Amino acid sequence: MSTETPQSGVFARQPEGTCYRVLMWEACALSEAALSAWAEQRAGILARMRDAGIKGSRGILAKLTAELQALAAEHIEAPLAGASRAGFSFARVGALVACLREDANVLAYRLGNAHAEVLVQLATGEGVDSMVSRWQGATEGMEWCTAPVVQSLTPAEATAWQQSIGNPAEAAEQEAEEAAAAQPFHHVTVLAAEAVAALQPAEGKVLIDATLGGGGHTERMLQAGAEVWGIDQDPAARAAARKRLAPFADRLHIVAGNFRNAAELLRKAGLEQADGLLADIGISSPQVDNAERGFSFLSDGPLDMRMNPGAPRSAADIINTTAESEIADILWQYGEERASRAIARRIVQERAKAPITTTTQLANIIASVLPRKGKQHPATRSFQALRIAVNDELGALDELLRSGLSLLKSGGRFAVITFHSLEDRAVKRYFDHVTKAEIDRPEWPAPRPNPDYAARAVYRKPLTPSAEELAANPRSRSAKLRVIEKL
Ligand SMILES: C[S@@+](CC[C@H](N)C(=O)[O-])C[C@H]1O[C@@H](n2cnc3c(N)ncnc32)[C@H](O)[C@@H]1O
């Protein structure tokens, strides 16, 4: 397993005033000869700069600055670029990365094998040296070279540097996460003890939490000593988990994206295989409780429902642009809504008068077709259906199921918590299939070996919340946990 750290981070902050590119490296990364030659020549240039400064010779100062940079490039940057030591494992520089990410003045960073480059704009009242020693102080046990190379850049040069290392999609994810960081996030973890115990977390174990959310399951895994790679497509969830789990930053890797691409996302971030994978499928409480997210028919908000606010299609897009028959199919397939056709017809009639843009508008339209019976709001099933369609939840689950075992080492555990029958059916069907050594069909004379046989069931029946958990958290009522172990 590789534990390489993410190679770069770019923030969406705009460079202003003078920016600095700081290059720092581990003391043992460069040869002593190169360093002492650099130090000697640098001291000579600095002395000449001092003289030029006293005389006010701006032209000479600019020439000497260029000389200083050329010297650094020759003695420091070129050898570092070719350095082959793989010293910067995430475990060692995780705290530095966390520190850089939290520093509001850092515009971007890039990590090499044994060095880090940071683009920063100076905070008022703090010098470059004190800032650098603050970052370096975060990495306990690492010996940094005491004299970093510091180069001043104009905002335009800083922007170019940012762009040269930046991945625009990653910058957008980080920007969204920063914007969401101030929002409160409260989610009660479901089947916390059971799901985490199933993955057997311990020191030295590497686990994947494909649905990081507020970090409830991950926190327990980290407390047990494991290293965790947490994926979430919701920037608000990532921001909340990053804050809550800051004390474990050196063993936690947060990955933005959809778990349907888990294999690719994790490989890019530096993880090939793990000892366990947990998926706590579905939405988090803040997604439902925050009216602005548009998931709830109980509070008025924009008809959105995207777990990833950057995803292209919102619930309003589906409701206002999709054919009547398709809306009916969504409500029937994902909500098992018997009045699907009548509701779809009324939606199409209403949207011809004015676009349907809010949760209350849609809930009222549904209620006008389907009068309230019993305790359940008439829009419950339709809202669930729409949410599943907006986020392609079953499609994503299917892809996660098909790639999950490939992400695990032999003996690794794959645990999934579901909250409704459509999801549970998909998990049960897939887990049943891969745990059967042979397949039998009525038309076959004898059973045949199952080419997909790859795991054993850990529990015969799904685990469900205890009476205490149900009493404390009614939202856990439909949860089911299924677990298999890779052979
Ligand atoms: C039920 S919450 C997880 C809560 C978490 N286990 C905890 O205890 O705090 C589900 C999370 O998974 C995320 N999620 C759902 N589907 C996803 C997908 N396809 N890809 C990535 N994240 C997803 C949601 O954004 C949400 O934050």
Image (cartoon, rainbow, N blue to C red):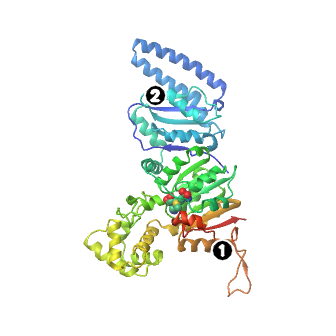
Q: Residues within 10 Å of mark 2 (few under 14, many from 20)?
A: few
Q: Is residue 211 visible?
A: no
Could you give the CA–CA distance between mark 2 and mark 1, rounded to whole angstroms? 61 Å
- State the residue lying farthest toward the right: 446
**Residue 158 falls in image quadrant:** top left
* Residue 415 pos. (x, y %): 63, 64
Q: Nearer the viewer, mark 2 or mark 1?
A: 2
The structure residue drawn at horizontal position 62% and vertical position 72%, both measured from the top left corner, is 430
Pointer 1 residue: 433
Mark 2 is on which residue type? Glu
The structure residue drawn at horizontal position 42% and vertical position 78%, both measured from the top left corner, is 374
Mark toward the start of the polypeptide (2 vs 1): 2
* Residue 217 pos. (x, y %): 59, 56
State left or right for residue 323 relative to residue 430. left
Q: Is residue 119 visible?
A: yes
Mark 1 is on which residue type? His
State left or right for residue 20 relative to residue 248. left
Q: Residues within 10 Å of mark 1 (few under 14, many from 20)?
A: some
Q: How many marks?
A: 2
Give the number of the disc on residue 126.
2
* Residue 342 pos. (x, y %): 36, 81
Q: Which type of secondary structure does the marked residue at label 1 adopt?
A: helix
Q: Which type of secondary structure does the marked residue at label 2 adopt?
A: loop
Of residue 156 and residue 313, the one placed in the foreground of this image is 313
Of residue 425 and residue 88, the one placed in the foreground of this image is 425
The structure residue drawn at horizontal position 68% and vertical position 69%, both measured from the top left corner, is 459
**Residue 71 falls in image quadrant:** top right
The structure residue drawn at horizontal position 73% and vertical position 74%, both measured from the top left corner, is 437
* Residue 127 pos. (x, y %): 47, 26
